[in-house]
Image (cartoon, grey):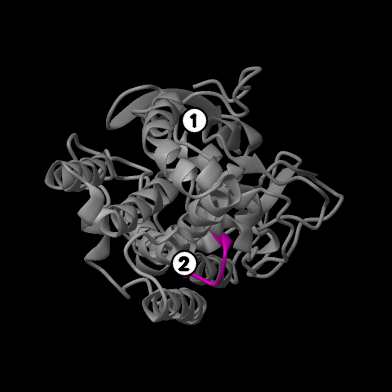
Amino acid sequence: YSSEGNPWLPGGLAKWGLGITETRETVRLFDGSEATLTIQNSANPFYGPDVGDIIKWGAKYAPCMRSSIATDTYESIAAGESRAGCCILNGQCGVLNQTDCNSFNGMFQGEGSRCNSTCTLTLRPCCYGATYQCLVQTQSYCNALDGVYHDEDSLTQTCGDVNCLNDICGLGANEEPGNPPRQAERLFLPIFLHAGVIHLIFNILIQISLGKEIEQASSWWRFSIMYLGSGIGGFSFAALFVPDQVSVGASASIYGLLGVDFVHLLHRWKALRDRWSALSCAVFSAFLYLIFGTLPWIDNWAHSGGFFFGLLFGNVFLPFYEWAGWKRHLGFIFSAALIGISFIIILTLFYENTDPEFCSWCTFINCIEYTPGLCDDL
């Protein structure tokens, strides 16, 4: 894709298709020689941006929301640079370890040393990729990786001097090195984002067919609360169980509408003539969307959470046809209390438990590798 983008899609398009694409780039190294890099990128089956841009726009992605494995990666990189020092070669310089400096026939100034104004800094920290990756390299090398070359000032010389999460997460992130951005807005922004044009059209068609009846049965403001509440609940659920997987889309809210539809169906059950047909249609729709959720950046955990919260929000906000009196009040109180308790438990576990192996099997229902490399960027 073009890193310069185009007028209607900031960041440009990823290559359309399934799996991994490869490109080769010629780069200039520290000593002036050239090398060829083979760069792998994931294609986008929905005709849209690459995973890096999806994250920058506000996808659900835990490293941008709380402490995570990315924080540990920063600490590991910074510790690995503790024995590095300034390397000077032909008036150019940068901070390298002694082995790398010697491989370029440079002059190593000693462990822990920093370069000063007597040489030109051409090696700078380069943040690249959707995960926390950083190299001290030339600008040519960094550009080939589609990375961010940090040459802000003369003090920015090592990966320990920068916070790559600021570059990965976007949305105005400006945290000190080692600190996550803590962007809680990623629990609701994904509702309004999509992985591509195909994803957007698919969700619009489903939403029109499913949402029309529910909005007519409730009202626009009740519908809005059920829609947004289910979406936020769905992505909170997904953030807990698959925190490091990137996901976007209105499907968490759509699954919430499915839950609301089940409640609506239950409350009209005796009045319906084709009740079993309506139930079969709802079950088939839920199953079909789960299959769709095995593609990249679409989250079956968000679907499940959205459905759960949709049942509860529907019980609170839909009009009741069959229940009245104490049954109506009891259902309302129970569902409203369970909504609050569920949010408290899910969000507490999400922010307190940062173990990446918390649910090691959870990723398997979210993306199936129909082609090699399809799920590599998740």
* Kind of residue at badge 2: Val
* Kind of residue at badge 1: Pro
Q: Is residue 79 left or right of residue 314?
A: right
Q: Name the residue under label 1.
A: 49
Q: Give the range drawn in magenta.
A: 64-69
Is there CB contact under 8 Å for labels 1 and 2? no
Q: What element carries label 1?
A: loop
Which is nearer the eye, 252 or 65? Answer: 252
Q: Which residue is drawn at 56% across and 56% down?
A: 225
Question: Foreground mark, 1 or 2?
Answer: 2
Callout 2: few (<14), some (14-19), or many (20+) C-alpha neighbours within 10 Å?
Answer: many
Which is nearer the eye, 353 or 333? Answer: 333
Q: Residue at x 51, y 77 (%)?
A: 340
Q: Name the residue under label 2.
A: 316
Q: What element carries label 2?
A: helix
Q: Residue furthest right?
A: 117
Relative image position of residue 332 (x, y in whole percent): 45, 74
Relative image position of residue 254 (x, y in whole percent): 40, 46
Asked if residue 309 lies in the magenta stretch, the reply is no
